[in-house]
Image (cartoon, rainbow, N blue to C red):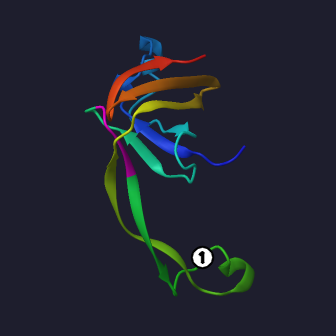
Amino acid sequence: MGLYDYLKISASKLPLSDEEKQIINDDTIWQTKDFDCILTTVEITNEGKVRYLDVEYDWDDNVKGGLYQLTGQLGGMVAKGSKWKDIEYHGFIMFGNTINDSRYRFKAKFTDGILVNIERVD
């Protein structure tokens, strides 16, 4: 199956029925495989631009990381800061998710870094 990236977008930008708008909101997180597929968070802003959350990590010798339970050794990566970075995207971004047993898929078209339209994909 593989990894993916997370995508955030305002539900008001999506072609949804009134009934679907009761289920899907701005907190809904979508998945996409159109970027690096390393669990990065990507966002389509209200202005129609694409940006990603650039997280800076550092090593902390005192953290009880994932190996602590196996080896008893301390140390792990910790986020020390993050900032949003714009992407001058040109092309399509496919994204979707399964919500309440219903599959939702969308295709967003970008020209010169700006959202042109979003359509529903079956």
Check disc 1 and report the residue beneath it: 65
The residue that appears at 55% across and 38% down in the rendered structure is: 32
**3 lies left or right of 70:** left
Q: In this view, does 62 lie above or below 45?
A: below
Q: What residue type is labelled 1?
A: Gly
Quadrant position of residue 75: bottom right
Query: Percent position (x, y) of residue 65?
Result: 60, 76
Query: Percent position (x, y) of residue 59?
Result: 49, 80
The residue nearer to you, when weighing 30 against 95, is 95
Q: Is residue 21 above or below residue 49?
A: above
Q: Is residue 15 above or below residue 76?
A: above
> Dot 1: what SS?
loop
Query: Percent position (x, y) of residue 36?
Result: 54, 50
Boundaries of the magenta span? 48-52
**26 lies left or right of 28:** left
Point out the image quarter for the N terminus: top right
Q: Crowdedness of circle 1 by 10 Å Cα count: few (<14), some, many (20+)?
A: some
